[in-house]
Image (tube, grey):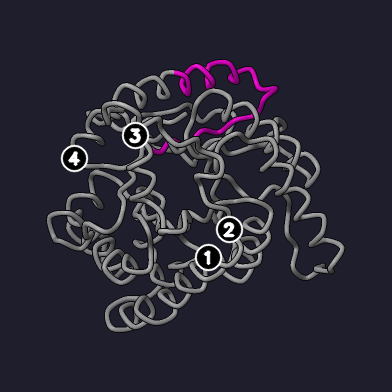
Amino acid sequence: MTTLGKYRHLSRCSTPAGHFVILAIDHRDNLRASLNQHAPHPLTDDDFRAFKGELIGALINDATALLTDPEYGIGPAVAGRVLGGGQGLLAPLEVTNYDVHPAQRAVNFIPDWGVTQIKRIGGDGVKLLLYYHPDADTAETQRGIVRRIVDECGTHDIPFFLEPIPYALDPAATLSSDELRQVTVTMARTFSAMGVDVLKLQFPSHTLLHEYEDPQEEMWFAACAEVTAASSVPWALLSGGVDFHTFALQTRIACAAGASGVIVGRAVWDAAVTSSGVERTRYLTTNARNRMQTLGKLVAAHGAAWWAKTEAPDVRGKSRG
């Protein structure tokens, strides 16, 4: 049974039907580096805030919530009145180093930032990205971090959105579809039992559209259904760097198999990185917005309500968390 406070926060992050259509723009150093490759001069902090502000302003009205960072995203979105009272707000805890193999990516927390600060500024969810393999030497350490944040989020009555990313133990290899499915199912079972509130997961199988056939769709659906069965909490699909066409297909299949929506970034707004000025504005207000709307329709048509996996709070007596 969840608390009244967490239930209220989750409601603010979803549609009235209980679906997540969350816009993700919590990317920092890697996104800034990509922007600098196409900019006439290196971006200043204000330039980077302006980019995020324009992107959020163009897409937020088609999202149920916003996931963004405290340094460049939250302040401008709130103080600039871009993020309205009708959308939820999620914030990350971590800074990720993409220059090393996932097995070496220790959790580095944003300095002077945490669950307390997220709740204090009116946040509705806490997000942690965690590279994880159940057989890695670091697995118990990673689970210990999750336990601590579960406890902190319980103290502050705010939902914990965990994003566990699977990886191959061999630095020279990648997970096969079967291994990806197995590790994802194991993560769903492990972390949902530990008390996280929502899982943010990659599609649990490789989707090669040039080899696409109906039997593969059945296999992909079965993989997603297995994740749903393994998880005792709702899960939402992340885009994981795939193109929009692929992500739309993944969204339809995952939601039909029990996912409660999407938390989407580059699959929607990727071309904004390589454009600027009027061209960028036109792209964000047309193509990117159409993509958000398309995902919203897919989630509405096929998704499971998050409350199907979240027991409602007991409201007998006083309404307290």
Magenta-span inclusion, residue 90:
no
Where disc 3 sits, the SS reads helix
Residue that mark 1 sits on: 300
Q: Decide: marks 3, 2 in contact (CB < 8 A)?
A: no
Quadrant for residue 228, please give it.
top right
Q: CA distance from mark 3 to mark 4?
A: 19 Å
Q: Residue at x 84, y 68 (%)?
A: 214
Q: CA distance from mark 4 to mark 1?
A: 30 Å
Residue type at the position of mark 3: Leu
Magenta residue span: 127-147
- 190 vs 92, left or right, is right
Residue that mark 4 sits on: 121
Q: Decide: marks 1, 2 in contact (CB < 8 A)?
A: yes
Residue 291: x and y in percent read: 48, 73
Residue type at the position of mark 2: Gly
Q: Which mark's residue is nearer the viewer, 3 or 2?
A: 3
Q: Which mark is residue 4?
A: 3
Q: Residue at x 54, y 23 (%)?
A: 194
